[in-house]
Image (cartoon, rainbow, N blue to C red):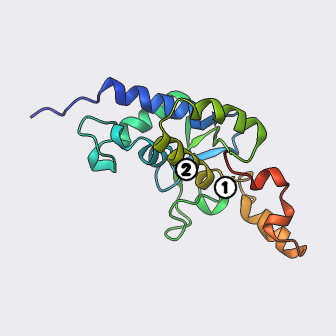
């Protein structure tokens, strides 16, 4: 029996998700995990589960599979290998830290706490339903907190350690705009 083809509507939503929630950058230091909790497909399943395949965490029989979604991601981003321990990869840090993992290079999650990102997100939110808006806001608040630093420098962990050494709490070290959620 042949596989059921992915619906065109599901592919359109996958492209919309990539263009709306993830910014392409020129920096090799901006990376997104290909798999695991903070991957683009994981985020897609949270906001648009009705367009993701059931076997991969969605609710559609003709939705986008993880493999198909990752192929669409390759149209937007390069793929590369990074060691999670070197780059602060939040996905599966507990096991096999020395193993290299696949990532999408030159992309970052939009951050609702940054003014320029917030303007882009306000336009996006008007196109989503109420439930999708709540899911998208929660997703970006969760995912944008991971900002890996330059390769080999430990990412955000270094800045957290530095602020603790200087006696500041994480909230005190951030400007007020960083604590604001999408409104």
> In the image shown, does 116 or 38 lie closer to the viewer?
116
Left or right: 128 as drawn, with respect to 25: left
Q: Residue at x 83, y 74 (%)?
A: 164
- How busy is the neighbourhood of tag 1: few (under 14 within 10 Å), some, or many (20 plus)? few
For this orientation, the residue located farthest to the right is: 166
Badge nearest the viewer, 1 or 2: 2
Q: Is residue 39 visible?
A: yes
**Label of residue 109 in the image:** none
Q: Is residue 36 left or right of residue 6?
A: right
Placement of 93 over or under 18, stated as above or below = below
Residue at image position (34%, 51%) is 57
Q: Position of residue 103 (x, y in %)?
A: 55, 46
Q: Provide the secondary structure element on which disc 2 rests.
A: helix
> What residue would you read off at disc 2?
139
Q: Is residue 90 left or right of residue 118?
A: left
Q: Which mark is residue 145?
A: 1
Where the C terminus falls, by quadrant?
Answer: top right
Q: Quadrant of the N terminus?
A: top left
| Viewer-proximal residue among 127 and 173 | 127
- Mark 1 touching mark 2, by CB under 8 A? no
Kindly report the distance in space between the C-alpha atoms of the residues bearing marks 1 and 2.
10 Å
**From the viewer's perspective, is residue 144 above or below residue 156?**
above
Give how far across and how far down residue 129 sits, in percent.
Answer: 47, 36
Q: Residue at horizontal 60%, vertical 48%?
A: 140
Total labels: the figure holds 2
Q: Is 91 placed above or below 58 here?
A: below
User: Foreground residue, 108 or 168?
Assistant: 168
Label 1 secondary element: loop
Residue 81 visible somewhere in the drawing: no
Residue 55, given in percent of the width and then of the height, sits at 27, 49
Mark earlier in primary sequence (1, 2)? 2
Q: Residue 90: x, y in percent?
A: 58, 60
């Amino acid at each position: 029996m042949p596989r059921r083809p992915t619906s065109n509507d599901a592919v359109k939503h996958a492209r919309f998700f990539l263009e709306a929630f993830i910014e392409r950058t020129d920096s090799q230091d901006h990376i997104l995990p290909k798999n695991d909790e903070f991957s683009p497909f994981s985020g897609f399943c949270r906001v648009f589960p009705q367009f993701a395949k059931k076997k991969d965490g969605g609710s559609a029989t003709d939705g986008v599979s993880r493999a198909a979604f990752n192929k669409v991601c390759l149209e937007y981003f390069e793929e590369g290998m990074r060691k999670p321990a070197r780059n602060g990869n939040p996905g599966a840090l507990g096991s096999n830290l020395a193993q290299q993992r696949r990532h999408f290079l030159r992309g970052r999650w939009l951050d609702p706490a940054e003014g320029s990102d917030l303007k882009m997100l306000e336009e996006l939110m008007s196109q989503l339903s109420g439930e999708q808006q709540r899911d998208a806001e929660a997703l970006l608040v969760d995912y944008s907190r991971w900002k890996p630093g330059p390769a080999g420098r430990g990412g955000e962990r270094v800045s957290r350690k530095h602020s603790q050494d200087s006696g500041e709490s994480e909230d005190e070290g951030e400007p007020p705009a960083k604590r604001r959620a999408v409104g």
